[in-house]
Image (cartoon, rainbow, N blue to C red):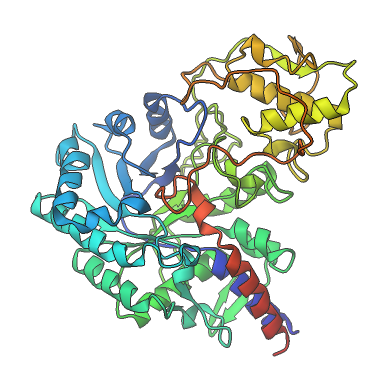
Amino acid sequence: MSMKREIYSIFMVSFLFGALSVVVVVEGLAVNWGTISSHPLPPEMVVKLLQDDGFDKVKLFDNNPQILKALAGTGIEVMIAIPNLQLKTMGNPANAKAWVKQNVTDYNVTSKAGVKITYVAIGNEPFLKDYKDMFVNATFPALKNIQDALNDAGVGDLVKATVPFNADVYYSPFWNPVPSAGMFRGDVADTVGEILEYMDKNNAPFVVNIYPFLSVFYGKGQFPMDFAFFDGKAAPLVDGSIKYTNVFDAMVDTLASALKGAGFKNMSIVVGEIGWPTDGDVNANVSLAERFYSGLIPKLLANQGTPLRPGHMDVYFFALFDEDLKSILPGNFERSWGIYRCDGRPKFELPITKDNKTLASADVKYLPKKWCVLKSDAKNLSAISGAMSYACDRTDCTPIQNGSSCGDLTSSEKASFVFNSYYQGTNQNPASCDFNGLAMITTKDNMSKGNCNFTIQIDVKPAVSPAPAPAPAPSSSSATSPSSKGGKNPGGSSKSDGPVASIPGTLCTLVLALIAILAQM
């Protein structure tokens, strides 16, 4: 297969698993704030971080009153959300009107002392193929009723209803897989057209999510790694006179072409989510995440845009924090998308302003320097395996998986990691460091090595009461299969899970089939 055809094939992989975008507002960076964590930082502390870092836009996955209260008077622009499972309810205009009053106008959006809500997200990726049309018919009525309610309340010029889409609503045909050939998916084109017409009438943007990392992850070696980054090392994708050297620009312009073809060439595009995880896969690490953001951030600050959409664009990083209770259905990396760790420490020093200011750090307190580890004389392997499985059902064990930050630990070291993770999750409850006599508490951290950290929990109020710690019975189940408990149903949570709902497994099969077809061209 020629290099040109290979690049085209690779582009199809990236296209089907990512999405991208552009929009217009004031200069500054934007970020997603997810809260599926066992020990979330207090909202006031998070808002201070946002202000210290210069983030002037934040995207939420719900309408949490405590968070909105903390954002009041800050001037930070806020996107709130209506979960997918509530879309049908919003099909009733009275319900939509009540929702707008309770979640928008009651927060004094027209006052400097109020919450600067600018967008209401109508569901999250509701046309995702994996949902099998579950939300398709409910999306447009919800959008229309919410925007009508905003207009009737006199805030329609300030607050826009929009739909965060997955990239699978548009595509380039396999016989011409270039950005200029972008079009909307045939089975939803009519409904998307209705949505576009109404959003255009109300000057609302098209919001879409893109994940170059997932192009790499699902490409399984066939996606050129360099094309996911911004440093110009990738072989270009040639589309007429334009040479694309990164998937970001290619995906923005594919959407721009689809919008133009549908008659909405001037509609703004907003990137609702984009990021790079730092754990849970061989390509999910701090080094590659730093490479990714080191290219993306200067591009945004310089207002470079893309070949078809030059200039300023709003791009919401995914995400602000790691979230240790998210579902890992898509992969072990799912809990590690944050530019910050769960404790509010930045993962890397990146310039986030034109004057090279780097990420601030949260002022948190930690629990005492105590760790729970496997006793050195523990010999009952079946009991250890059962204890690990018990703990992994209640804590985050993704770092010990192959390719993760602690994947190279010995079996006994992995047991210590799991025991400590569970112990910290219970706020160092002494009863949680027993495991039928297998574990003990120590005041020395002799286990952390390299990028593998045996963490100490922060001293904040947990989101839920820490789990009790009965002595678990031995189990034959695997101790290295981390639980997906704690994650939200991706179909019904306005994607509080972030990219969980963005990874349709059926598309992976389709991509590989397309690659096989293109290889024979």
Q: Is residue 221 visible?
A: yes
The answer to which image quadrant residue 505 occupies is bottom right
In the image, is residue 400 above or below residue 45?
A: below
Tell me if 41 is positioned left or right of 373 in this view.
left
- Above or below, 364 relative to 314: above
Height in image: 509 above or below 410? below
Name the side, left or right, on which 260 lies relative to 408.
left
In the image: residue 338, left or right of residue 385: left
Q: Nearer the viewer, residue 108 or 87?
A: 87
Point out residue 422 in the picture as x, y percentages from the top left corner.
65, 24
Estimate the x, y position of residue 495 in percent, counting from the top left: 44, 49
Residue at 10% across / 49% down in the picture? Answer: 153
Q: Is residue 81 above or below residue 261?
A: above
Q: Nearer the viewer, residue 226 or 387?
A: 387
Image quarter (top left, top right, bottom left or bottom right) of the C terminus: bottom right
Q: Position of residue 79 (x, y in %)?
A: 32, 47
How far across and down, in percent of the image, does residue 497 sit?
49, 46
Q: Residue furthest bottom?
A: 521
Can residue 455 be seen in this snapshot? no
**Quadrant of the snapshot with the N terminus:** bottom right
**Number of numbered discs overlaid on the protein picture:** 0
Residue nearest the viewer, comparing 126 with 435 = 435
Which of 113/297 is in front?
113
**Residue drawn at 22 percent across, 59 percent down:** 91
- The residue lying at 25 percent from left, 56 percent from top is 161
Quarter of the image for residue 304 reads bottom left
The structure residue drawn at horizontal position 53% and vertical position 37%, both measured from the top left corner, is 486
